[in-house]
Image: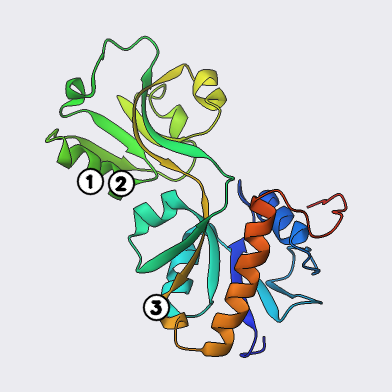
Amino acid sequence: MKNTNLKLAIQKNGRLTFDTINLLCESGLKFNIDKRYSFASCLNFPMEIVYVRDDDIPNYVERGVVDLGVVGQNILYETKRNVTNIIDLNFGFCSLSIAIPEKSNVKKIEQLKNAKITTSYPNSTKEYFTKKNIPINIISVTGSVEITPALGMADAIVDLVATGRTLALNNLKVIEKIYDSQAVLITGAENIGCEKKQILMQKLIKRFKKILSGISLLPVEKIIL
């Protein structure tokens, strides 16, 4: 990858992938969207697109490995990396929420005192309950958080909720919301010094803002991932 080009990290596979690639294409950027590769060079803009895990993006941006990243705010809240949110991208909407079994007798979160709570977001969960002065037992898991109450592993879960369909399928219901989240464009302090890259960033951001305001730059072909 050329050092003089911008480097943008995006999620390789996940809930933000399609919408991110769609935004880039609507912005008039032409590149290989085949995610079997680690990165792709834009054909009509001096930028490299790096495909990575979403939870690695804030780390890469903070260290200056890449100049920009598209990531969910939930990852920023959880990792607490020193990065700056440049613009909200208006997709990937969801909420980090506390959910309990539908048959649970719990009516308010204070009743979760000393409860076992499974989550993929232990830092956000700990911070929230600490502020509420409610002691809990956090069990960190990766994936399939919703199934843990049925397995007798947890009294409640903390997880991302978009449509709520997955909760309903597992006989769970939301009792409290911790925070809202959406996709954002981020940069880090390591990327502020290069004037040339700053100019390129502003050009890219201008493209994104036009799309977000409803101005399409180019006809978009159907995207198949």
Q: Earlier in the sequence, mark 1 or mark 3?
A: 1
Q: CA distance from mark 1 to mark 3?
A: 25 Å
Image vertical order of residue 98 relative to residue 53, above or below:
above
- Is the C-beta separation of discs 2 and 1 under 8 Å? yes
The answer to whether residue 123 is left or right of residue 75 is left
Q: How is the image coloured?
A: rainbow
Disc number for residue 124: 2
SS state under label 2: helix
SS state under label 3: helix
The residue carrying mark 3 is 189
The foreground one among 95 and 34 is: 95
Instruction: Tell how many labels.
Output: 3
Q: Amino acid at mark 3?
A: Ala
- The x, y position of residue 38, in whole percent, is 68, 71
> On the image, which quarter does residue 7 sit in?
bottom right
Image vertical order of residue 39 relative to residue 133, above or below:
below
